[in-house]
Image (cartoon, grey):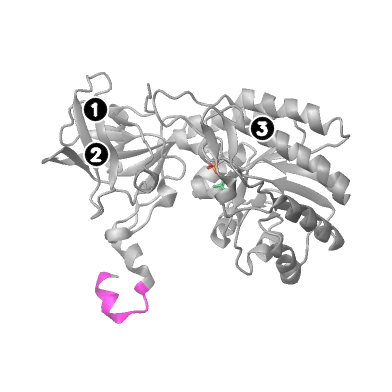
Amino acid sequence: MKTPFVTKEQIEEIVKKYPTPFHIYDEKGIRENARKLKQAFAWNKGYKEFFAVKATPNPFIINILKEEGCGVDCASMQELLMAEACGMKEGDIMFSSNETPEGEFTKCRQLGGYINLDDITLVDFLEKECGVPETIFCRFNPGGVYNVSNGIMDNPGDAKYGMTRPQIAEAFKRLKELGAKNFGIHAFLCSGAVSNDYYPMLAGDLFKLAVELKEETGVDVKYINLSGGVGIPYRPDQEGCDILKIGEGVRKKYQEIIEPAGMEVAIFTELGRFMLAPFGHLIVKAIHEKHTYKEYIGVDACAANLMRPAMYGAYHHLTVLGKENEPKDHVYDVVGNLCENNDKFAIDRELPKIDMGDYICIHDTGAHGFSMGYNYNGMLRSKELLLHSDGSVQLIRRAETAKDYFATFDFCDVMKKVL
Ligand SMILES: *Cc1c(COP(=O)(O)O)cnc(C)c1O
């Protein structure tokens, strides 16, 4: 059972000022969840969450998380600029980029962010560009298949990220020669892991690696960055993670591995999905119905507003607002207006009878939702709204206009008409 954080009555009020489609975020849910995460790792002195900006790059959202003590994880110049605009200070930014273009490490250093090197070749690239800072992270990739528990796994051996075991040792030695004093290890080995075992298992592996690397290279590992990857239950029959149990699981590994080695490390996380996905909905309106070889409901948004179903075949739960208790005795494809047959928010979904004008809540769009948006077919990105804890609603990004879409032709006379 999945219950939207907004009711039909609330949406009917909201659309008077802000017509569909829009992404709406639940401030109360975001804050409560962030507090629980903090509580889960309160046992670790230096613990900090660096919210993965790419999940929901909106300054209003980032500010809420900042108030809850989070920093940000960035991977591009624009994300660094967003962090700067949000007032992120020294130690608030983790820069976990890959194939990093020139200039971005420099920017990160200017902002006092932590640099996380994805590859050994970046050691000299960094040294040449802006020098090696005192504190430096390296990203580890053990290769092979990462098997967490009952079917939850991922494939680091196929992933472009991180250094091999010999490379990370080599990188640490070289970085030490170049003046680095404090070292961090980062790894992201399983994406969307709806399991209480992923972080403890990863932490165990990285703690062991930290102890080994200390012996092998003499460096002082001060940080373990567990990155993102904690999943959420997109399906109504799925059980979510228990972040308090996850925190306890990591603590056990810490006591088993780090404490006996006489070490002390701060734990960092870079969660995106876990921080935001459940606290965002894409609200759309049914505007057409089509009865051909299948039953279609056309809505006023498309994959340009939420790409995950088209891109990964991802499941997003739908609730027809106001019909929560009606029998699900119809089977629909709920589709957008792209000229692309993968533009389907749901396929063969059992739903109550949908009437034109019904509002449909697409669940769990708070992370990797709006942000994956694009402009194919000349589609425009929607507005974003914030539902405050007191029930009021704030526009936190306006919808794109045709002018925005054509803005990159501003040098071009023939486009003046539409600018
Ligand atoms: C995408 C990403 C994250 C966040 O991943 P989630 O699955 O949203 O938790 C964290 N760190 C890095 C380096 C990433 O690329």
Q: Position of residue 287 (x, y in %)?
A: 17, 42
Give above or below for 69 relative to 402: above
Give above or below for 204 relative to 163: above
Question: Do callouts 1 and 2 mark residues in contact (Cβ within 8 Å)?
Answer: yes
| Residue 411, magenta (yes or no) | yes
Q: Earlier in the sequence, mark 1 or mark 3?
A: 3
Quadrant in the picture for residue 39: top right
Quarter occupied by the N terminus: top left
Residue at horizontal 63 percent and vertical 23 percent from the top: 245
Q: Residue furthest bottom?
A: 413
Q: Residues within 10 Å of mark 1 (few under 14, many from 20)?
A: some
Ligand 1, what quadrant?
Answer: top right
Q: Toward the viewer: 196 or 39?
A: 196
Q: Amino acid at mark 2?
A: Val
Q: Which range is magenta?
A: 409-418
Mark 1 to mark 2 CA distance (whole Å): 10 Å
Q: Amino acid at mark 3?
A: Met
Quadrant in the picture for residue 297: top left
Reading the image, the residue beneath label 3 is 201
